[in-house]
Image: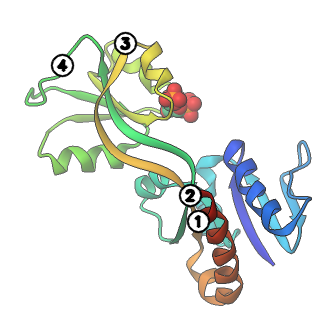
Amino acid sequence: MLTIALPKGRIAEETLAIFSQLFGEGFEFESRKLILETGGFRFLNVRNQDVPTYVEYGAADLGVVGLDVITEKQLDIVDLLDLGLGRCKVAIGIPDDQELDWSRPDIRVATKMVNIAKNYFASKAVGVEVIKLYGSIELAPLVGLADAIVDIVETGTTMRENGLKVAEDIMDSSAHLIANKNSFYAKKEEILDLYGKIKAVIDSKSA
Ligand code: PRP
């Protein structure tokens, strides 16, 4: 049996919809239940940020997690497949009535994605102070905590409604199917069989 950690919410529902398409009905979590066993699979309903932990420790063989999280946490996992779900980008946001002089020596950038931000600015040889926040990132430039943010942009609504604009895109992201390294070797046939089936569904959607 394969254990698969799914991030609570829409991505879990859309992933389970792929399983329904492949294996029939029954791929739905009951209201408050955190484990779903069906069709020879065991699904775990976990917080988005916790998926990598379940997979890295081998409590789950597989997981579904954003490329932004894989990149930020520099995960030691097997990145199997881009599921194409939950597409978004990581971008730099600044107040929409301003341009930022990146050569200024005192620029502060607020973000939950400290590693992505630091690596990006280092690659551009721009020196900034990166400030870690855990949510509501768009607030930081509005109250003088930071000059800019690095954050997820999906529809763009949050930035727009808070008077921010995208200054630069950093990376595209979407949900990926990942595997624990040991599971990948111990259960290779099972995992590759499932990988092939899911890939066929995704390819047929994008065809
Ligand atoms: C995420 C992200 C942005 C927003 C982007 O926040 O950090 O704030 O969604 O989506 P949009 O472009 O469609 O508006 P989330 O909802 O996870 O809340 P958080 O700020 O508490 O992390």
Camera sees residue 135: no
Local crowd size for mark 2, using a 10 Å CA cut-off: few (<14), some (14–19), many (≥20) = few
Residue bearing mark 4: 99
Residue 15 position within the rendered picture, expressed as x and y whole percent measured from the top left: 71, 56
Q: Amino acid at mark 3?
A: Leu
Asked if the residue at tag 1 contacts the one at tag 2, i.e. Cβ–Cβ closer than 8 Å, the answer is yes
Residue at 13%, 40% in the rendered image: 126
In the rendered image, the residue lying farthest to the front is: 207
Residue bearing mark 3: 142
Q: Amino acid at mark 1?
A: Asp
Viewed as shown, does residue 10 lie left or right of 88? right
Viewed as shown, does residue 21 lie left or right of 120? right
Local crowd size for mark 1, using a 10 Å CA cut-off: few (<14), some (14–19), many (≥20) = few
So how many labels did they put on this image? 4
Residue at 23%, 34% in the rendered image: 129
Question: Which label is found at residue 206?
Answer: 2
